[in-house]
Image (cartoon, grey):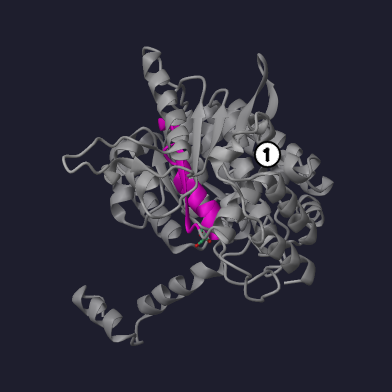
Amino acid sequence: MSSSISAAWDRLRALSPRSLRHLFEDDGRVAALSGRIEWRGEEGPRGILFDWSKTHLDDELLAGFEALAEACDFKGKRAALLGGERINVTERRAAEHTAQRGVGAATSVEEAEALHERMQLLVEAIHEGALGEVRHLIHIGIGGSALGPALALGTLSRDLSLVDVHVVSNIDGLSLEAAFAACDPQTTLIAVASKTFTTIETMTNAASALDWLAQNGVSDPGGRVIALTASPEKAVEWGVDETRVLPFPESVGGRYSLWSSIGFPIALALGWDDFSAMLAGARAVDEHFRDSDGRANLPLRTAFADQYYTRLRGCETRAVFAYDERLALFPAYLQQLEMESNGKSVTADGSPVGGPTAPITWGGVGTDGQHAVFQLLHQGTHLIPVDFIASIAPGDALDSAHHAILLTNCFAQGAALMAGGNMSVESTNGKRDQARSFPGDRPSATMLCDDLDAATLGALIAFHEHRTFANAVLMEINPFDQFGVELGKKMANDIAKGGQTFDASTQALLEAAGLA
Ligand code: F6P
């Protein structure tokens, strides 16, 4: 760690932030710690309000973190990211997901446009019947090759779905069997989504899906496959016709890939306009991230709060609760984005990190969570910053009372965590009942969307991508590699190959399962 970075951390550690109750004595606080990112919708500006006022960020902390960002060369790293430089130093690659949305090096943006055009042509040809009647798509991929499509379809496909999509990721055959049970083989396409086109779960599931088509009277199962990959030559080798291979650049990371051809099922199910709207919402956030500095840069400011809680207050987890059923998969999506990106122990140059890195991201949907896990948030011994996400416009068509209760509960949770209180009654021995007292001063943040349409989802995801990157810069780590997942894969392969012995416990388990 350079001396200017460690000096910036030392100055931050020396600060003693005030309680939320004290911070709210400042009338200007909500305006100072809230901001909107907007884009043009059909009926005027649409956007998301990011309210970080219920966190402990104050002027001193903000200034301290701005100094840290400068010491970490945040601006230089951002320019390198958006300029297509090889910012993923361990793999000597750029990280060009923003180019898929039109913000990046000119050649990469042009390449992305050409690949999108090719994808659009195939999507529209399928809609027009070029591959016969298509009513179902089984999308096979795992991790970043599945979570993005699953999230986008879970969020956006309630109103309209041109094709019924089933996302299958797990190698557990129950997952593929469930998709088979829901699809008619004669009208089903298979999308094989894999950046590397080597992932064992995906390739095994894909082979079983082709067998299923063949066993159910489809004469040319290979002709029903679309490959979505950064290794097009491997897809062709595997047997997919070149015309149905939709490539994406190697410089787009797996967990950042839903903007590329990995988004094919989104475009097929929802239509090209919705896919484009998702890109446009993300682009609005990219432009904000590129053009704003210091605390005015909302993903960066959010990273200031994240770093404050993780490194200065020792918070080991961060909770995310979406007060919207459509975002039920959002915490799972963020888990991969944040934990696979920033769950590291060394800095980009290989030295030990200067403190804890990514907290454990967890969460769920409100109001369900309130009746299950919120007890710990309010009265447990852990301090857990909570993010709330909600939409002003409802997704349902029921009586507006439903949505009003949903939103008031969301806002009430943030208020209660912050204010705390005492609901105790006088007990018989005259003592107050401490079990009914709430300490308060517990931080939360709220993302309030005007609506939850394709552009908003794109913006929400892009906001978290940049938040993750900004956190990585402040921690000096490379968020774009994921070597931590390799050792387990290698061991599984070694076990499958046979002929080796492992530790006594693993050996006994293999023997008990009849695998050794
Ligand atoms: O094992 C981790 C990982 O490499 C993720 O980063 C990636 O999203 C996933 O596996 C799937 O990889 P692929 O798209 O190459 O099949």
Q: Which residues are magenta?
A: 315-340
Place residue 292 in its image quadrant.
Answer: top right
Q: Quadrant of the N terminus?
A: bottom right
User: Which residue shows up at 52% across the image and 28% down it?
Assistant: 270
Left or right of 303? Residue 1 is: right
Left or right of 48? Residue 6 is: right
Structural crowding at the residue carrying mark 1, measured as other residues with C-alpha within 10 Å and reported as few (<14), some (14–19) or many (≥20): many
Residue 148 percent location from the top left of the image: 52, 44
Q: Is residue 337 magenta?
A: yes
Frontmost residue, 208 versus 341: 341
Residue 467 percent location from the top left of the image: 63, 48
Q: Which residue is mark 1?
A: 116
Indicate whether 300 appears above or below 352.
above
Residue 288 percent location from the top left of the image: 74, 37
Residue 383 percent location from the top left of the image: 45, 52
Frontmost residue, 30 versus 198: 30
Looking at the rendered structure, the secondary structure element under dot 1 is helix
Place residue 24 in its image quadrant.
Answer: top right
